[in-house]
Amino acid sequence: MKIEVNGETREITATTVAGALQELGWGEARVATALNGSFLPAAARAGQKLRDGDRLEVLAPMQGG
């Protein structure tokens, strides 16, 4: 299926947000996620189904000073 990840169209085989993160290389990373503009907690990712055309935002924390 095709979804938009951080503004870029990607073709994935995963059917859940957790699966998509794993497939896209963020499986073990500590990231924040939003699906179609709404925050998605880490605990909900495994059960959140994806549909063709969904928009997934993945944000990694930044260190700063």
Image: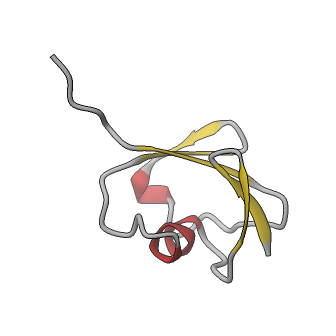
**View extreme (left): residue:** 65
x and y percentages locating residue 2 in the rendered image: 80, 68
Counting from the top left corner in percent of width and height, residue 9 is at 76, 59
Give how far across and how far down residue 46 sits, in percent. Answer: 50, 69
**Rendered image quadrant of residue 50:** bottom right
**Quarter placement of the N terminus:** bottom right
Residue found 52% across the figure and 77% down from its top = 23
Q: Horizontal and vertical percent for residue 58?
A: 51, 48
Q: Spot the residue most to the right.
A: 53
Which residue is pictured at 84% across the width and 67% down the height?
A: 52
Tell me: 16 left or right of 31.
Answer: right
- Residue in the foreground of this view, choosing between 17 and 62: 62
Quarter residue 51 falls in: bottom right
Q: Compared to 12, does 9 lie above or below? A: above
Quarter of the figure with the C terminus: top left
- Give the colouring mode of the picture: secondary structure
- Front-lying residue, 46 or 54: 54
Would you say 23 lies left or right of 64 here?
Answer: right
| Residue situated in front as seen by the camera: 47 or 30 | 30
The count of marks equals 0
Q: Residue at x 45, y 74 (%)?
A: 22
14 is higher (above) or lower (below) than 44: below
